[in-house]
Image (cartoon, coloured by chain):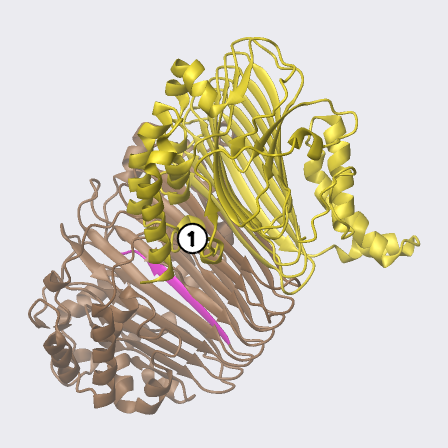
Chain colours: A yellow, B brown
Amino acid sequence: MSDFEKINTDFTTLFLDGRALLDAGNSAVMNSCRKEAFRKFLDLGGIPHEQEEYRYLKLLPLFDKDYHVVLKYIRQEVDLNETFRCTVTDLVTNPVLTVNGWWFDGNLKPEIPEEVVVCSMQEASVKYPDLFVRHYNHYVTAARKDSLVALNTAFAQDGVFVYVPDDVVMERPLQIINLLRAKADLMGFQRNLIVLGRNAKATILVCDHTLSEHDFLINNATEVYLGPNAHMEYYQVQNQHLGASQINSLFVSQQRHAVFDSNLVTLYGGVIRNNLYVALNEEGGECHLYGLYIQDKKQVVDNYSYIDHIAPRCVSNEHFKGVLDDAAMANFCGCIRVRPDAQKTEAYQANHNLLLTDTTRVNAKPQLIIDADDVKCSHGATVGQIDEEAMFYLRSRGISLEEARMMMMFGFAHDIIQRVKLEPLRVKLDDLIDKRLRGEMSKCYNCIMQCKKS
Amino acid sequence: MDNIIEEFTGSEYKYGFVTNVETDTIGKGLNEDVIRTISAKKEEPDWLLEFRLKAYRHWLTMKMPRWAQLDIPDIDYQDIVYYAAPKQKENRSWEEVDPELKATFDKLGIPLSEQMALSGVAVDAVMDSVSVKTTFKDSLAERGIIFCSFSEAVKNHPDLIRKYLGSVVPYNDNYFAALNSAVFSDGSFVYIPKGVRCPMELSTYFRINARNTGQFERTLIVAEDDAYVSYLEGCTAPQRDENQLHAAIVEIIVEKNAEVKYSTVQNWYPGDKDGKGGIYNFVTKRGLCRGENARLIWAQVETGSAITWKYPSTILKGDGSVSEFYSVAVTNNYQQADTGTKMIHIGNNTRSRIVSKGISAGFSSNSYRGKVKVVKSCQHARNYSQCDSLLLGDKCGAHTFPYLEIENSTAQVEHEATTSKIGEDQIFYCNQRGISTEDAVGLIIKGYAGDVLNKMPMEFAVEAQKLLQISLEGSVG
């Protein structure tokens, strides 16, 4: 039996044996999707190993470990609100915590407009069954061929639920802090659902952190529904340690004139796979996806995006940049799909990579699938080094080699960071990146967790 | 404007005639006996038969690849005739060649007769599976250049064939390469010795004539140190309702400081307006720049075939070697194309340039798929890729799938792609200056494909230009 078959069999055993635990205390809606999702996982061949979408990502070493899987919430013995403090100076947010994929039971009540709902998935499925049924598991279908998303649907039990009703603006950003904390190597699943009604507006900041040194593999899926004219800003900062790996999928469904802005900053982690699926379902939708990855050691980041222009007159804009050092590897696969009726589409996509050593690897796959004629689409990808002439310019003005390199790299990265609209966050990210590029620990100032495993 | 589209998309395939020559064919089907028969008919040495059988046995273990952006109906490999040769007498002087055959190639406008020496192109014409006539052989031989059919080469230069056959495209390379290695019937062989500049363009003209046949030819080009050759390939087929398979292999070896230019004008029968019939063109073309500063240039104009699936590629092994790829692919009606190139950078300071222009009209689907790979040990590789798509009509598709795999930090790789249609404003500008819409579109397409057409040899540039006009001019989306 091959290693993959063995892992798939293990999952089957886990699914069958753990079914009772998986279902216990969870919403009927989530439970009703499990069986079919798991069958889909098996039908797609289990853990991806030869699929085109996972062409450059070796998943075997990730899955071939003895992880513990927690099928019910374990009460944390410490107050994580105290243990974990994210301090972005001047940025006032409403923080909510999750632990290993579960809503943290000690979450403080966020200061939000009273119409807005922020709670656990489990709670939401009981309190708002209509909303839940209408949206849950509807948008992940965009990932037709991704077995790992199906695996998430089969196993996920909890996560964060956000609902911003029609015409409500949530001024203060909501900060979702996903923590990983365990006494052994752990595999976790998390499922989030975010629904914004007509004309609603929200800003969401997601931070991924690890609080202990064990190996983690977290499979996280988030579904986002943006009603007509809704506007969402979404920021995610991935800052973990080398043993923490992530499969992180985001599904966005945009209705008429909805706007989705996202910025995905990957600073540290073992193997990180980001799936971004955006469906522009109705006219006038707009999405802007930005991403930055700074990788060294043996880190791997694999960004996959699929932007589906279903309706006419939508705009999409995608720009991912990365700096790679040591033996890091970065993959980028961006697919722009323009359906036959999506005339007047504008879609742009770019991927730029800066390589610092000969042991780094970059694989880029920018793709266009265009079935309408009146469109403006372009994509570009480059792989290169720091510009010699610019270096010479700086050196000739008395700037040291090292400092000049830093300035160049920082400028390269700042291109993406400047798109962050929250100023305090932008300043903070610039600072984190500056430190990161200098090889310092890219931890927040007050973080008590100084992981040795980085 | 719709009328103009109609007019052009409606233009008939003008090479769709059938030639009435007696052919020597074997029965349909594929098995080891068929391969032995082909080999026996061609009086091949044992090692070649072994090569074929090895390929066939490997092919049996393989599955038809399905990853391309193509909708390929199942192919019944037992329903194909693997060997069809126009019957002719042994004596092969020009006067003896079947007049029907002569007329065919005359119709195609190929300067087959040596009396047409002024046209200055040496031609090896391949009808169905067998090379009919090679012109200028003697004058080439004076310079030590070998230009003959593959079967002749097997007989007269077995050591060269044995040395190079399968050295760039191994028999187990892919599904269709394995099939071709098993059943290939003829093709061309070119050998340019050290330091020789081939004085004229060499050319092969492929034609599928007989019904239900597949064409499986093999081209092998070897350019020794400091040699130079420009090679042209053209293809046509009669108009038939059923689909025919063409699975060829082209292998090119370029040694130190040598240069090979390989140009293709592919105009196989594309099927009728409803997508019925047409050729499946599944070809493996690959060149190896083995020596330092070797140079290989691919230029192709793809207008025919129901389905085109090929990636002329270059392995840049020698330090400082250079490869360029220029392509115009046109799809109309229900044609499908998934084509592009692969540039594998192994040697230091290797450079490659890719310019691909896709034009789709009607209900067609046109994809560019290309790979640029820079291996770890390759220092200072440079690649520039540009692939543009032009859409004429709202029912067609244009797709781009580049793969960039970079393992060395000194590499500089750039990829750019755009998709657009002919702007109303451009047409308006031309109209205003008294240029009809039809001419304006022709003008714009000429300009759009100009980068590539300029790279074609003179003789082909004219033909390619004409083909583009026939296939597309006037179709404005």
- Determine if the magenta segment contains residue B264: yes
Q: Is residue B312 visible?
A: yes
Please tell me in which quadrant of the rendered image residue A24 appears: top left
At mark 1, the secondary structure is strand
Span highlighted in magenta in the image: B259-268
Q: Quadrant of the N terminus of chain A?
A: bottom left
Residue B20 horizontal side relative to residue B207, left or right? left
Asked if A401 appears above or below A140 in the picture, the reply is below
Q: Nearer the viewer, residue A74 or B88?
A: A74
Could you tell me residue B129's position as x and y percent? 20, 71
Left or right: residue B316 compared with residue B274: right
Magenta stretch, main secondary structure class: strand
Q: Give the residue type that dot 1 points to.
A: Arg
Estimate the x, y position of residue B132 in percent, counting from the top left. 21, 75
Magenta stretch contains residue B441: no
Does residue B407 appear left or right of residue B305 in this picture?
Answer: right
Query: Toward the viewer: B252 or A448?
Result: A448
Foreground residue among A59 and A121: A121
Which residue: 58% across, 76% down?
B293
Name of the residue lying farthest toward the front:
A77
Image coordinates of residue A32 in percent, x first then y, are 31, 28
Residue B139 in the figure: left or right of residue A257? left
Q: Residue at x 37, y 44 (%)?
A: A147
Residue A249: image x %, image y %?
Answer: 49, 37
Kindly identify which chain the residue marked by label 1 belongs to: B
Quarter holding residue B235: bottom left
In this rendering, is residue B272 above or below B268?
above
Label 1, residues with CA under 10 Å away: few <14, some 14-19, many ≥20: many
Image vertical order of residue A26 relative to residue B267, above or below: above
**Mark 1 lies on residue:** B369
